[in-house]
Amino acid sequence: MSYDVEKPDEQWRAELAPDEYKVLRRAATEMPFTGEYTDTKTRGVYSCRACGAELFTSAEKFDSGCGWPSFYDPKDSDAVELAEDRSYGVVQTEVRCARCGSHLGHVFEGEGFPTPTDQRYCINSISLRLTADES
């Protein structure tokens, strides 16, 4: 896959903190209920911590109780890409930044949350950077 932002692995390692690198570039997962954005209610835009692409907004964020920030839809339809993930012995749908290919989390459907899409984008806080609205 080709991305607008491509860097050699050594550069990603140099630019990201070790825990950021593990999640964003090696598809690790942060521990539940530990991320800085899990419970935040701040209004704003959530961008990719690796490349700065705008991914989600606080308007689509909801409390799912899962331990990670949850969104029911990305900011724009082309902000993220979805890929099949079989890494844990089950088939899941991985969510990646469409601009740099960094791992963000997974998306789940049909869980019955009262959201317009019935989807839960379960995203690692460490994959995101929140820019708060100034109003």
Image (cartoon, helix red, strand yellow):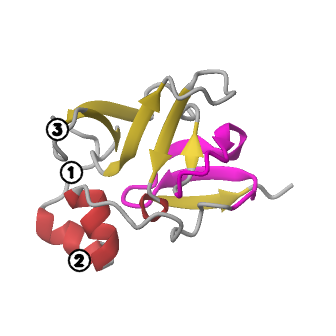
Q: Position of residue 107 (x, y in %)?
A: 42, 35
Badge 1 element: loop
Badge 3 element: loop
Q: Could you tell me which quadrant the C terminus lies in?
A: bottom right
> Could you say which is closer to the camera, residue 72 or residue 10?
72
Q: Could you tell me which quadrant the N terminus lies in?
A: top left
Q: Which mark is residue 14?
A: 2
* Most distant residue in the right direction: 135
Spatial CA span between label 3 and label 2? 29 Å
> Could you say which is closer to the camera, residue 109 or residue 18?
109
Residue that carries the numbered disc 3 in the rendered image: 86
**What segment is highlighted magenta in the picture?**
40-67
Amino acid at circle 3: Arg
Spatial CA span between label 3 and label 1? 24 Å
Q: Is residue 70 left or right of residue 78?
A: right
Q: Position of residue 103 (x, y in %)?
A: 31, 50
Q: If you read the primary sequence from the N terminus, does the residue marked by circle 3 or circle 1 appear first?
A: 1
Q: Is residue 63 left or right of residue 101?
A: right
Residue that carries the numbered disc 1 in the rendered image: 6
Residue at 66% of width from left, 21% of height from top?
116
Residue 87, quarter of the rendered image: top left
